Image (cartoon, grey):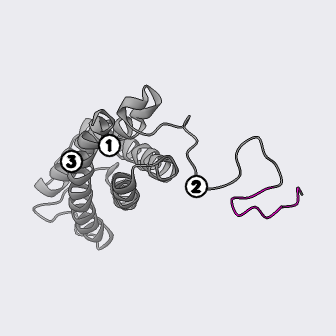
């Protein structure tokens, strides 16, 4: 039961982040479409010099975040070391791009100017996602600190094979060649 501590905290974070990344994808796509069409005078858009960069990184962060949540869902389902590698690495990449979008959101707020409600909502979601994604990454990697919290990178329970001391034999007893 103690091994499920990080798992029980990571599961709600995964769902929350997945929903938030879909919202970010929708708002960023709408805003980028308006920006490309030259409709920055739309009442719910506005923007400034950092808007284009922010929107591109927000869409990239949303797509990477959604994909990492699918990998994370698989990891939470099986909760093994081999699934941790895929879920952990994709979550770190998603967090890194989200952190870039977070920085651009802060820059856009700092520049100022009039920004519509959709752009302000998008900035807020990206800022919140920067923190919740970091917390999710920490929950996935909680096994580093203690095996009580989940699978870590030190455990070696990988499938069926020859014991560590016997070279040249498999589980079926058929000798193998050492190439």
Q: Secondary structure at mark 3?
A: helix
Camera-nearest residue between 63 and 123: 63
Q: Quadrant of the C terminus?
A: bottom right
Residue wearing tag 2: 159
Residue at x 31% of width, y 37% of height: 6
In this view, the residue farthest toward the top is 145
Camera-nearest residue between 27 and 143: 143
Residue 172 within the segment the image draws in magenta: yes
The CA span between labels 1 and 3 is 12 Å
Magenta portion: prevailing SS class = loop
- Single out the mark in the foreground, 1 or 2: 2
Question: Which labelled disc corresponds to residue 133?
Answer: 1
Q: Secondary structure at mark 2?
A: loop
From the top left corner, tell me how far across and down residue 154 is, in percent.
56, 34
Residue extent of the magenta highlight: 169-178
Whether pointer 1 and pointer 2 mark residues with C-beta atoms closer than 8 Å, the reply is: no
The CA span between labels 1 and 2 is 31 Å
Question: Which labelled disc corresponds to residue 12?
Answer: 3
Image quarter of residue 168: bottom right
| Sequence-first disc among 1 and 3 | 3
| Sequence-first disc among 1 and 2 | 1
């Amino acid at each position: 039961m103690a091994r499920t501590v990080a798992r029980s905290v990571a599961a709600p974070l995964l769902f929350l982040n997945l929903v938030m990344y879909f919202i970010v994808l929708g708002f960023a796509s709408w805003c980028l479409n308006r920006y490309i069409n030259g409709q920055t005078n739309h009442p719910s858009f506005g923007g400034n010099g950092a808007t284009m960069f922010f929107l591109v990184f927000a869409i990239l962060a949303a797509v990477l975040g959604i994909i990492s949540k699918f990998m994370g869902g698989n990891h939470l389902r099986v909760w093994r070391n081999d699934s941790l590698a895929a879920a952990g690495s994709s979550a770190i990449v998603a967090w890194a791009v989200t952190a870039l979008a977070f920085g651009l959101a802060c820059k856009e707020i700092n520049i100022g100017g009039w920004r519509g409600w959709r752009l302000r909502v998008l900035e807020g979601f990206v800022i919140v996602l920067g923190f919740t994604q970091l917390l999710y990454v920490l929950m996935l990697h909680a096994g580093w600190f203690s095996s009580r919290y989940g699978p870590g990178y030190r455990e070696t329970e990988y499938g069926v094979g020859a014991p560590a001391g016997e070279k040249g034999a498999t589980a079926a007893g058929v000798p193998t060649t050492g190439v």
